[in-house]
Image (cartoon, rainbow, N blue to C red):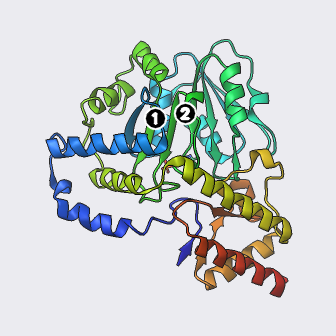
Amino acid sequence: MITFYPGPSKIYPEVAGYLQEAFESGLLSMNHRSKPFMDLLEATVSTLKYKLQIPDSYEVYFTSSATECWEIVAQSLVSHRSIHLFNGAFGQKWAEYTARLQPRVVPVGYGLNEQAEAFIPPHEEADLLCLTHNETSNGTALPDTTLNACRQAFKGLIAVDATSSMAGVALDWHQADVWFASVQKCFGLPSGMAVLVLSPGAMARAAEINEQNHYNSLLFLAANFRKNQTPYTPNILGIYLLGKIVSRIPPISMLHEITRKRAQDWYAFLETSRYPALVAEPAVRSATVITVEGPAPQIAGLKVFAQQQGIVLGNGYGAWKTTTFRIANFPAITDLEINTLKHCIEVFRTNFTV
Ligand SMILES: *Cc1c(COP(=O)(O)O)cnc(C)c1O
């Protein structure tokens, strides 16, 4: 089976061997306050920072999901008001989760082909701006120019959900204070863990707010991770696999080029096929999740046809459920698999009219 599902997604094949190695290493039965675990945690963070080119001054913690990171940000980093700019389901959910924890949320929706920076509302009290780097539900992404413009325009902290882009494309870390991603997307790993990246500014804000009521309060995470420990028994297997995978992948600048080139090829392919990209504006098209639009019966037909060839496509999401499908363009997917899917779409297009 070949999967283009955008999360959980294709796992790097090397993971099979790493699972066995993890078992044999004995680490999985080891106390998480022991030296071998602390060494594993330290080495994993350090390799991750090196491969993804995360600035030295930024800290990296592990949590269980991107959803948990939404809550950590809401609990530990907002003192007055948070603005949420979104154009799709994940960004909107983040705003909704935040509103349940702190009611002072300013949700701002914008259109699929629009650029987010034009929509920052003037709000004197706002001290956190939340953005979704790659909106997995519709295949849009924030161009670097948007992050740059937001950094110029907004004085408070900026938090970015990069769940479906981190480890697939290079991120301009200094343009935001909080970045996070779960590992079942571009990292090509089994689900159940997330990477949370924090600037010195974010840590200063956490200290100022001094929120300590939760098992995952940011200060509590910091106190533990700074000693190479974790507040609770962590996902040791997940940390082990992440460490192995980041040791193996090329530096992010190289991955970025590969992902960009493949995305360009996908969009060029779609121009000539009967099924256009959902996102018309090239500047906001995602490089890692490509959303393809078509009449509902043809989308349904193509998904069944692909399934018969052993190919799993991503379903449309929310409002675009029946009129789109999604193609993950994550690094674990091979050129051969991509060509197989392109061929499948071609065959369907030329032979079937539903
Ligand atoms: C997948 C995804 C999430 C949710 O990730 P979990 O690991 O299920 O919490 C959040 N945001 C974006 C943009 C996503 O793609």
Mark 2 sits near ligand 1, with its Cβ under 8 Å away: no
Mark 1 sits near ligand 1, with its Cβ under 8 Å away: no
Q: In the figure, is residue 180 to the left or right of 320? A: left
Q: Considering depth in this image, is 166 or 52 the residue closer to the camera? A: 52
Q: Mark number for residue 173?
A: 2
The C terminus sits in image quarter: bottom right
Q: CA distance from mark 2 to mark 1?
A: 9 Å
* Residue 160, position as x, y percentages in the image: 58, 35
Question: Total marks drawn?
Answer: 2
Question: Mark 1 — residue?
Answer: 197
The answer to whether residue 211 shows anywhere in this view is yes
Q: Is 228 situated above or below 220? A: below
- How crowded pointer 1 is (Cα within 10 Å; few <14, some 14-19, many 20+) is rated as many
Q: In the figure, is residue 22 to the left or right of 178? A: left
Q: Mark number for residue 188?
A: none
Q: Residue at x 43, y 13 (%)?
A: 208
Q: Residue at x 51, y 31 (%)?
A: 178
Q: Secondary structure at mark 1?
A: strand
* Residue 281, position as x, y percentages in the image: 83, 48
Amino acid type, residue under disc 2 in the picture: Trp
